[in-house]
């Protein structure tokens, strides 16, 4: 990703974070940016944030008042906002769980582009991505890239338990085991690190 595009996305993140804080809307960074903030691969083209369903109207009003274009799509589990060309998805009911106080509280607090914010735990992020896989949307590339880069931050046993009902998640585990990314169930897993081991992303371009 070009540095200029990265800077544009990060500036939008700073702006949206400030607006939500001013409106007293708790949020957490999710998606590709959350993985990047934890030391993962360069981010995708948009920003994903988690908010509670009860806060969607307040977030919608605050972002619109700040000059962002805001939409409520028919999917019924998110609100979309646009800061220029940058898309921000504010999700309150992503695949795998609903956003509530417990989910936000278990997020880690990290510095992202010189802004302190909650960042989604990698187990929750991978759970959501794996449970979103379907026969019509079966792209293992992004989730494999994140799993490879952040393997030491994953509680593999917990991830298995939470996604055991998905045949697509079972296929994912077959892949990561064969690729040496994830230990097999009969072998000990690496220790799950604490918050102190997480990286701090500086105010700089991705990568």
Image: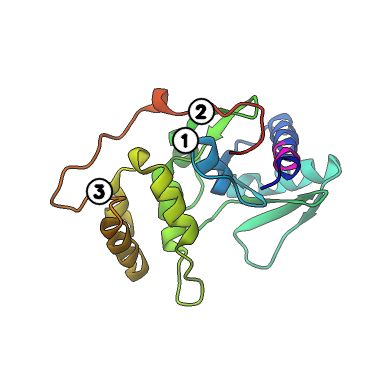
Q: Which residues are magenta?
A: 6-10
Q: CA distance from mark 1 to mark 3?
A: 19 Å
Q: Main secondary structure of the magenta part?
A: helix
Q: Is residue 96 visible?
A: no
Going from the N terminus, do you reach mark 3 or mark 2 first? 2
Is residue 114 visible in the rendered structure shown here?
Answer: yes
Q: Is residue 135 left or right of residue 116?
A: left
Q: CA distance from mark 3 to mark 2?
A: 24 Å
Q: Answer above or below: position of 6 versus 89.
A: above
| Residue with the mark numbered 2 | 109
Question: Residue at the location (36% across, 38% down)?
Answer: 153
| Marker count (numbered) | 3
The span from disc 1 to disc 2 (Cα, nearest Å) is 7 Å
Is 40 covered by the magenta stretch? no
Please state which of residues 139 and 47 is positioned toward the viewer in this rendering: 139
Q: Residue 95, position in %: x, y?
A: 48, 59
Residue 107: mark? 1
Query: Mark 3 highlights which residue?
Result: 157
Marks 1 and 3, the one that precedes in the sequence:
1
Residue 142 against residue 150 in the figure, above or below = below
């Amino acid at each position: 990703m070009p540095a200029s595009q990265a800077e544009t996305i990060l500036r939008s993140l700073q702006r949206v974070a400030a607006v939500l804080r001013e409106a007293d809307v708790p949020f957490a960074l999710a998606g590709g940016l959350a993985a990047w903030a934890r030391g993962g691969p360069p981010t995708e083209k948009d920003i994903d944030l988690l908010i509670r369903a009860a806060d969607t109207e307040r977030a919608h009003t605050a972002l619109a008042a700040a000059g962002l274009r805001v939409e409520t799509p028919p999917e019924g589990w998110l609100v979309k906002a646009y800061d220029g060309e940058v898309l921000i998805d504010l999700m309150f009911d992503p695949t795998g769980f609903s956003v509530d106080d417990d989910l936000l509280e278990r997020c880690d607090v990290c510095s992202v582009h010189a802004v302190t914010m909650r960042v989604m735990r990698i187990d929750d992020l991978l759970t959501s991505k794996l449970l979103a896989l379907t026969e019509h949307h079966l792209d293992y590339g992004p989730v494999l890239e994140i799993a490879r880069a952040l393997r030491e931050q994953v509680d593999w046993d917990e991830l298995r338990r939470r996604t055991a009902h998905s045949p697509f998640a079972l296929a994912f585990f077959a892949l990561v085991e064969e690729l040496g990314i994830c230990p097999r169930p009969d072998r000990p897993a690496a220790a799950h690190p604490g918050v102190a081991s997480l990286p701090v992303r500086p105010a700089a371009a991705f990568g």
